Amino acid sequence: MSVDLGTPSSAGPSPAGPSPAGVSSAGVVSALERAGLEVRADKGTLGMYASDASLYRIPPLAVVRPRHVDEVAAALAVARETGVPLTSRGAGTSVAGNAVGRGIVLDFSRHLNRVLSIDPGARTAVVEPGTVHAVLQKAATPHGVRFGPDPSTHPRCTIGGMIGNNACGSRSLAYGRTSDNVAGLELLTAGGERFTTGYDDGIAVVSGAESVLSGVRNSVGRHLATARTEFDRFGRQVSGYAVQHLLPERFDLTRALVGSEGTLAVITQATVKLVVDSPVRVVVVLGFADIVAAGEASPAVVAHGPTSCEGLDSRLLDVLRARRGPDAVPSLPRGAAWLFVELAGDELGEVTARAQKLAADGIGLDALVVTDPATQARLWRIREDGAGLAGRAPSDKPAWPGWEDAAVPPHKLGAYLARFDELVASYGMTSAPFGHFGDGCMHVRLDFPLDQPGGTKVMREFLTDAARLVGEFGGSLSGEHGDGRARSELLPHMYSPEAIALFAGIKHAFDPGNLLNPGVLVDPDPVDADVRPAGRFPLKQLAMAYPHDDGDLGQAVHRCTGVGKCRADNSAAGGVMCPSYLATREEKDSTRGRARVLQEVVRGELAWSDPSVHDAMDLCLSCKGCASDCPTGIDMATYKSEVLHQSYKGKLRPRSHYTLGKLPFWSRLAGWTPRLANLATRLPGIRGAALWLAGVDKRRSVPAFARRPFHRSFVPETVPTRTPVVLFADSFSDAFSPEVADATVRVLRAAGYEPQLPSGSVCCGLTWITTGQLDSAKKILSRTVATLAPDARAGIPIVGIEPSCTAVLRSDVQELLPGDDDAKTVAASVHTLAELLAKTPGWTPPDLSDVEVIAQPHCHHHAILGWKADADLLASTGAQVKRLAGCCGLAGNFGVELGHYEVSVAVAEQNLLPALDAAPHAVVLADGFSCRTQVTDLRHRPALHLAQLLDR
């Protein structure tokens, strides 16, 4: 069916449900505080919680972080008394706008996040709603069981959020939807009544809420024909309420409440079913000419009984390769689209035989059987990062959610994909589809012209046409994300007026005052209301160039789509992001939280110097982990430098900016009298005063200045047979670790190179950059580029020693000196030691087969330079290498500054310190000066640079 929704203005349509108009934020906050609740209502927090992973921005009046079920009830009581809406929130990864609201937002993830019990015999677990999926899996796995559904956000999404949306994930072919995996719920109605749902010998039961149940049954009774014919038509029909579970003959409130998006009740506890995982998995990758062919082939693939059948378009992989290089994608069968098919079982031989049969069945152009778990993990990581990667359209414009979750009966998927591509093209937009093709569910992001006048009108028209199209195919507007604000208004394209009336009756029975998540499903907000990135927010006189975002900081910070990968522990995949969040578990200390605050800045809602902005930025380590690990390409280190630059331009700065921020300058001076400088940091009394004046925590040791800086001891040699290279001896190697520079020289000479120092004094300006002294940084870098450019133009490689300084010359230099051709030439000439040795003909590494190595890559090395060359080189030596993920915690000036010590140590405790303690006799490899300093400070162990290891 097709219903014309009209075109209301996006300037400010009236919100549905109770409005906080006339209710002061202060009054609501006061009432919540009187109830003894943990409340946040500062501008920064409200900005962070105004968005989830959707297009929408709806600032709440207050954020409550309940510590107990009684506090959930207390917050509900305040909502009733004040008439203010209440929205439940887990990890805030909702793509449809289900987790934002105008009143009170309950963040369950902060405290109500425990696995309360696991019963391996019954295969059930009892969890609080804020329990992260990965935490449940970690608790269940030792018992040989797991929670079945596994959405791509599984490292950070919460079980409560999965229940709210009826999440499915990539293995729903084997394990079903969340509604198939919930054994019971404990809830509160909007009126404050507690009730439970569950099963007794397989029979669905409910305890409490009799009046609610009576109202629900009456509503369904008035629309029985509709309830029996319009629902449960195929597996991924998620949109609307799950009315099929409210029929008189199979009344099952547990399953009916799953997918109700927080509009009917508030979950306080859940009992979930667990499954036994098959021990053997084999992946078959099938290649196709295009995504339509992949969709058409899905039913034939499903006939082979896979646990998963996921589709990916080459357009998505092109985005990944453009961002992370050609090695980011493993070898795939020929084609422009692929199905990743997983087969599972108990015996390797049996599963492999099934995989080979599928590969030989002639489905698609080509096939590849993958049995190696590491390669499988790489493939699934690409799929899991799909939503973030798709945040950049094939057009290289920002791509947005809104129509990212439609599903059709699987046998219609190919035809639907063809028509959908035609529809996208007719609007002049581009897309890169992917999704759960075995279930008929497609995910996609679209480059809506939201930065242009009338952009939201175009978005609305497209969504209306897309809803008509999916209705034509008998599909569902949502296949697992829920309808939220993105699709609820479009439900009349999928359901009859009678079904819409039935939804309203169910909502009224549970929530007659429309307190719970209003604007979603029933009496919905317009799809084009409160669109966060709509319009342009150009900021003038920026210090950084933002070349990948057309010079627009607004576009840069809106890269953050909210998928929340920064809230997960990414160390299992070798990631770094986000060390500060893992240390504090506070949203403000996540990459996403900081991006949301900066979005408020570019909107003009917050000033650069606002305390909320600086509070969010304070614990950013400037590690640049997000620059590589965030699938959307956020670079928070750069944004932090901009914030500090804008805030302190022409003003008095923190003490550490004058000391640590100008460390190369001071180290040059100290190089003339190193003994006197070292004495000042060691004499009792003087030491404490000196550290305080420098803004350094007194618990930190101060590295000693070398008795003779490297640049004054280096002696060039003239050997005609050697190839010249320029050795960029950074300030740290020069003033504090000349032995590292000496070792680099010896390794280079042994490889047939003759190092030469730059013709003049050079510095990368790193410490000025990290402290936001960007005008000075530009001057320093301009002089450095001018000095290095003649050698670079002559084709002479430039070899860096310190990874962070090397990364500046390769990356930051182009942010600070845009349009400078010499800067580009220098950046292209910069090499790490491992990169240069890897392409040196005839060089052979030493035999280190008897050496155990704990390797801590510098964060900038991981994020900007890439550590693959180092990993390959170490492998060729035969050394036993354990590569650590995460940040060391010192991160340049961060870990020594006053107020950062505890977080610095907490970050080190995530990966570095446990690894050191587990291997007390291993050689510690750490190219970064700050990494070596952290190891020495916290474990009193020596650490080597790669050059020193090769020079042993």
Image: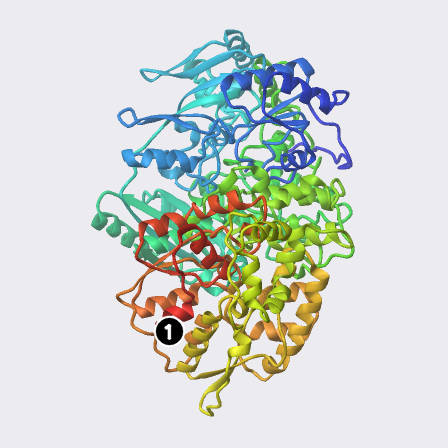
Residue 688 in sight here: yes
**Looking at the picture, which amino acid does disc 1 mark?**
Asp
Q: Against 492, is 398 above or below?
A: below
All told, the count of numbered labels is 1
Instruction: Count residues near mark 1 (Cα–Cα under 10 Å), then give few for <14, some for 14-19, many for 20+.
Output: some
Using the rendered view, name the quadrant where residue 287 is placed: bottom left
Which residue lies at the image location 65% right of the left edge and 74% below the top edge?
785
- Could you say which is closer to the camera, residue 116 or residue 756? 756
Indicate left or right for 145 with 779 as reference: left
| Image spot of residue 691 (x, y percent) | 59, 51
Which residue lies at the image location 37% right of the left edge and 80% below the top edge?
843
| Image spot of residue 222 (x, y percent) | 56, 12
Q: Quadrant of the C terminus?
A: bottom left
- Could you say which is closer to the camera, residue 897 or residue 153? 897
Q: Against 129, is 556 above or below?
A: below
Using the rendered view, name the quadrant where residue 506 is placed: top right
Residue 392 in sight here: no
Q: Which residue is mark 1?
A: 951
Which residue lies at the image location 40% right of the left edge and 54% below the top edge?
940
Provide the secondary structure element on which disc 1 rests. Answer: loop
Q: Against 233, is 610 above or below?
A: below
Q: Quadrant of the N terminus?
A: top right
| Image spot of residue 902 (x, y percent) | 51, 42
Indicate left or right for 530 with 827 as reference: right
| Image spot of residue 187 (x, y percent) | 49, 18
Using the rendered view, name the quadrant where residue 752 is placed: bottom left
